[in-house]
Amino acid sequence: MTNSAAPRAIPVILDVDTGVDDALAILFALAHPGINVLGISCVAGNASLERVVENTLRILDVADAPYIPVAAGARRPLLEPARSAAHVHGEGGLGTLQLPPTDRRAEPISSVELMRKLIVASPHPVTLVGLAPQTNLALLLRQYPDVVSKIERIVFMGGSTTVGNATAVAEFNVWHDPEAAAIVLDSGVPTFMYGLDVFNQVAIPEHVTTALMHSDSDLAHVVGQLLGNRIALGSGRNADYSGLIGDAGALCALVDPGALETAMLPLRVQLSGYGRGQTIVDKRSHPGEDIVHGLVGEWEAAEVALDVDVDRYVHLFLDTLGLGSALALSR
Ligand code: RIB
Ligand code: CA
């Protein structure tokens, strides 16, 4: 007998640049019963498009996932050249983690075509989860604006209301393709920004990661290896160990939004000067001279994550992956 009380799993399409923390996000999304991964779209970012696709397919093997369509999208931003983040994610994109080759293959269609096909076929509006430069999302919205009515919202890891990581003020995903981020924000689709303000907080304690790395569970060992890789910190800390769950936090936000402090705030992407790629979030409680004197137009508003209950997401992440015992064992 089906449990009619069980809430329907959220139909999602992930857009990734796998990437150490994209890998953690994919593992979490596949493991959480409240998330139904319809497909995965790949874009160049942390690594080349080819590496991102291969890493994504191999992570599906780690999760022992059923068939999930994966497609290759943009190999560079709309205007900027591709600039990998090998200094953070390693040349292969998965840090020190080496995974065996996979028999899985990407779909013979582009990311945009796959996303459109899945959105149109879905009986319920689909949530797009952007964990990478938003080039694919922008191309989808420009090529097929008709899909907007069937998109529930876009939850994206990106941006910051304070410190940057790619630059002093810009976060990598938005900085990598600022025009794409501006197009997404301007699309009329409700957007949720999971930015560095919360991204930089949710970290697994080092002793837990050490316990995972010494576990005899393959999954624990993979997750430990990924957590043990350093993800560039935007908060100025230069610790070698970060333990950040990174992109996986945006999936935690999907299933447990109550752990976040959020606000609907005017938001725009800076497209020029040193601040190019910065997400300027207007947190003022009253209009300033710029608005009073008509110097700026109406900004789009997005729901912005401002703070997070770190412990709650640490437990959610580990428990969802069946690794919660590592917390207890390693105290
Ligand atoms: O700034 C962090 C973001 O950039 C994460 O999505 C990471 O994977 C990289 O894509
Ligand atoms: Ca990413």
Image (tube, rainbow, N blue to C red):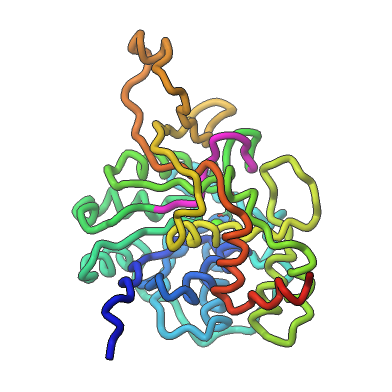
Q: Is residue 163 magenta?
A: yes
At 22% from the left and 56% from the top, the residue drawn is 147
Q: Is residue 47 visible?
A: no
Quadrant the C terminus occupies: bottom right
Q: Which quarter of the figure is the N terminus placed in?
A: bottom left
Image region (quadrant) for ligand 2: bottom right
- Which residue ends up furthest to the front in the rendered image? 5
Q: What stretch is highlighted in magenta?
A: 155-165
Q: Which of 211 and 4 is in front in this view?
A: 4
Kindly indicate the quadrant of the structure image that contains residue 226: bottom right
Q: Name the chief secondary structure element in magenta.
A: loop
Front residue of 209/72: it is 209
Q: Is residue 164 above or below residue 120?
A: above
Q: Is residue 75 above or below residue 265?
A: below
Q: Where is residue 91 in the image (x, y as percent from the top left)?
A: 69, 63
Image position, residue 95 (x, y; %): 70, 66
Q: Position of residue 239 (x, y in %)?
A: 80, 51
Asked where in the image residue 221 lies, by quadrant, the reply is bottom right
Q: Is residue 33 left or right of residue 99?
A: left
Q: Residue at x 41, y 18 (%)?
A: 286
Q: Nearer the viewer, residue 193 or 82?
A: 193
84, above or below 91, in the image = above
